[in-house]
Image (cartoon, rainbow, N blue to C red):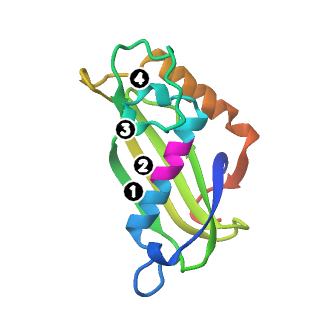
Amino acid sequence: MKVNTISQKHIISFSECNYFGHLKLQACLKLFENARFIVSEMADIQDFFIELHRSKYSNVSLINNENEYFMMPVIENNIVCHNQVKTGEQVKIHTWLEEPLGSYCTFHHYLTSCDEKKLFISCQTKVVLLGEKSGLRKSLPSVLNERIINFIKNLKSYNEIEVGDGI
């Protein structure tokens, strides 16, 4: 199956690896977290989040008419290591997301070789919307939901990769 993704290149540094020169899980999760942050910038949804969760370049506008700000903490990570990633390896981080279900969003991440022929790590990450005042919500605010759905539809203009058990 082919999916459209946001992708970015990265070179695995020594500090991201263990003593054997392999990528640490903690560093991998950090790469995926940064990828989700980039998606939030590209989808133009940062105005909904508390200040600590926004880019320093975020321009708070009036699109958030909810009278509160939100967080989207990770509630589940399913990560699978397919191949070892070594210090100095040039990789691509691919990210895409499913349409929101209630107040939940599911992100998918692939860490591949730059030529996309080798899959190193795959991850499915579920996040949930929490309001500063309202706590767990039943659904996303309508404007936020619309922006996420439009972003998903517009992913066709980005990178396309084959997904499955291997590449």
Give residue 145's position: percent from left, percent from top.
49, 23
Q: Amino acid at mark 2?
A: Thr
Q: Of circles 3 and 4, which is in front?
A: 3
Q: Secondary structure at mark 3?
A: helix
Near mark 4 (Cα within 10 A), the count class, few <14, some 14-19 or many ≥20, is some
Q: Which of the 4 image quadrants contains residue 120? A: bottom right
Q: Label 3 to label 4, Cα distance in Å?
A: 20 Å
Per the image, the residue denoted by label 3 is 52
Query: CA gap, disc 3 to disc 1?
Result: 26 Å
- Disc ID at residue 125: 2
Q: Amino acid at mark 4?
A: Leu
Q: Nearer the viewer, residue 119 or 43?
A: 43
Residue at the spot of label 1: 78
Q: Position of residue 31 (x, y in %)?
A: 49, 58
Marks 4 and 2, the one that precedes in the sequence: 2
Nearer the observer: mark 3 or 1; the answer is 3
Tag 2 near tag 1, CB within 8 Å: yes
Q: Secondary structure at mark 2?
A: strand
Distance between the alpha carbons at the discs numbered 4 and 1: 23 Å
Q: Which residue is mark 4?
A: 140
Residue at the spot 73% in from the left edge and 67% down from the top edge: 115
The part of the chain drawn in magenta is: 33-38
